Amino acid sequence: MTKRDWIRKSTIGLLLSTSLLLGGQVGQAASYSQNSAMSETIVHTAKSLIGKDYQYKAEGPESFGSAQFATYVYKQAGMRIANTMTALYSGGTPVGRNELQAGDLLFFSSSGGSKPTYMGIYIGGGQFVYSSQREDQVVLKQLSDYASKFLGARRYVATASAAPKASSSNESVSSIADQIIRIGEKYLGTPYKYGSSSNTTSTFDCSSFTQRVFREAGITLPRDSRQQSTVGKTVSKSQLKKGDLIFMRSSGSSSDRITHVAIYAGDGKILHTYGKPGVTYSTFFGTNWEKRVVTIKRVIPE
């Protein structure tokens, strides 16, 4: 081989490698862009409603309760979340005040207690929008003026907190999926408890388990199964890959209301938690689990 031929082949090899690497990053960037656009829509909608009336538990569009304001705004961005303050505060991904991103939900206590009494939507720049009972309308405020009443924040828009990371040649989709399964396996036998806190690993419900496992693998998911089903890429059963999330309806139900989520572990098995087994493996194909499928999502960047 001449020196010229060697240089030409090496250049082609380098271009192919770069193309494959960038292809993976483009997939991640697309996912990030989608969630970034959702955050922007949430912020735009929240700001557009400033001046609308406050009304206890009103769901809009002309007047709003505190929690219902957030529910309405998220719905306009194509995302369904709970419509009570208690449920919203117990769900999502907890984030610190110095980690806030546009679209995060903020919770406050007017009495200084541990339970929120009102809430708002962070829009960036140290500002938030909320439906104020005292001012009888939707208002824009500086977060710094409410520091003494601030309880915490929750993130519901998955992966909106950071731009996609470049994948190394060793960090393939398959290796991330393997990592997710290894993380899940360390919790085998952990008891099931409906409504388990996202901050504990002593018990799980189905969606707090998937949220925890993916979080430890570096992927942010919303708190409950219906919210989790709104992110990622929809795939068919014939396209199932290890690490995909499988969303299911209740046993015997004809409704497509999602009540359960499991991780596809490969080899026809799912890794999930329910009832007395707690975190366990189950056979998927040819079982009632398969019959209950509503949708399947791939959230591992491709």
Image: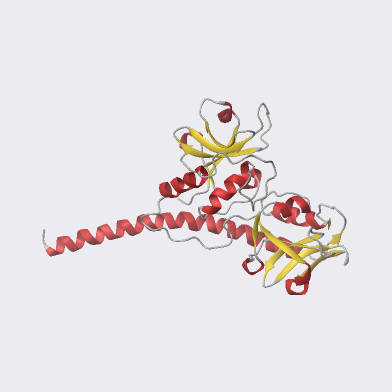
Is residue 247 visible in the rendered image? The answer is no
Residue 181 appears left or right of 7 = right
Q: Could you tell me which residue is drawn at 68 percent across and 37 percent down?
A: 257
Tell me the quarter of the picture where residue 246 sits.
Answer: top right
The percent coordinates of residue 37 (x first, y second) are 60, 59
The percent coordinates of residue 213 (x first, y second) are 54, 48
The percent coordinates of residue 133 (x first, y second) are 87, 62
Residue 140 appears left or right of 298 = right
Q: Could you tell me which residue is drawn at 60 percent across and 40 percent down?
A: 261
Is residue 36 visible in the rendered image? The answer is yes
Q: Is residue 51 above or below residue 267?
A: below
The colour style of the image is secondary structure
The percent coordinates of residue 244 (x first, y second) are 51, 42
Q: Residue placed farthest to the left in the image?
A: 2
Q: Is residue 254 above or below residue 120?
A: above
Q: Could you tell me which residue is drawn at 44 percent across and 33 percent down?
A: 267
Tally the numbered discs. 0
- Quadrant including the N terminus: bottom left
Q: Is residue 76 above or below residue 268?
A: below
236 and 100: which is toward the camera = 100
Q: Could you tell me which residue is drawn at 63 percent across and 60 percent down?
A: 39
